[in-house]
Image: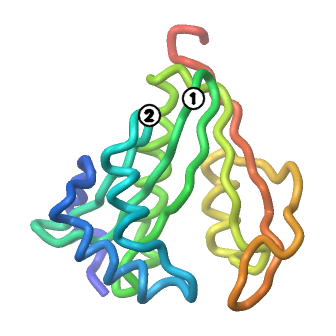
Amino acid sequence: MVSKALMDILIRDLKPEDVSAVLTIEKASFTTPWSEILFMNEIFKPRSLPKAALIGEKIVGYICANYLLDEAHILNVTVNPDFRQQGIASQLVDYMVDLLNKEGCRTIFLEVRISNEAALRMYEKAGFRIISARKAYYTLPTEDAVIMSLVTFRKDEG
């Protein structure tokens, strides 16, 4: 683990040459990881905002979101297991919420495993609220998802 005091996080666009490093984190984090094609689709898809978090030259996390009109959906937030519990995911979420707000999004949705208490706490701290659930949304293991949303306001709207 790296101390928070030593971390200087840079968040930037996810690039095609980053996908290999992202896949390593994805496979270490999920039983049903995203594929290379899914990440490449996010990189090149209009209205998609894939971002990478770096410490120095090392990718330590990433976030992917899509938006259309005034709604957005955070699809994936993941941090390298060696760098978890240090606020990187929170930084990624806060960065994405701000970016989506600037794009005109007023409501942001996401799903999270009902058992992922750390993620639930992080999202709640960021202002997301539970609005519903999806039965058996996840596989390996089969588990319900909690649907969360955040209603945002542009800074110029007060």
Where residue 52 appears, as percent x and y from the top left, is: 29, 58
Work out whether mark 2 precedes mark 1 in sequence or the reverse, and give the earlier one: 2
Residue in the foreground of this view, choosing between 110 and 125: 110
Q: Is residue 26 left or right of residue 111?
A: left
Instruction: Check the image and report above or below for 56 versus 41.
Output: below
Q: Residue 66 placed where, x, y %?
A: 51, 42
- Locate residue 17 relative to residue 13 in the image: left or right: left
The amino acid sitting under disc 1 is: Leu
Most extreme residue toward the left is 57
| Mark 2 and mark 1: Cα distance apart in space | 7 Å
Q: Position of residue 35 (x, y in %)?
A: 42, 73
Residue in the image at 19% along x and 67% along y: 55
Q: Are marks 2 and 1 in contact (CB under 8 Å)?
A: yes
Q: Residue visible at 49% across and 32% down?
A: 100
Q: Quadrant of the N terminus?
A: bottom left
**Residue 112 falls in image quadrant:** bottom right
Identify residue for label 2.
Answer: 47
Horizontal side of 53 relative to 8 (left or right) equals: right
- Residue extending farthest to the front is 37
Asked whether 76 or 82 is in front, the reply is 76
* Mark 2 element type: loop
Report the side of 110 relative to 37 (left or right).
right
Q: Kindly identify the amino acid type of the residue bearing the numbered disc 2.
A: Arg
Quarter of the image where one finds residue 71: top right
Q: Give the residue number, with chain letter if any, for mark 1.
A: 68
Q: Which residue does the image show at 64% across and 56% down from the upper left?
A: 123
Q: Position of residue 58 (x, y in %)?
A: 17, 72
Q: Residue at x 73, y 44 (%)?
A: 149
The quadrant of the rendering that contains the C terminus is: top right
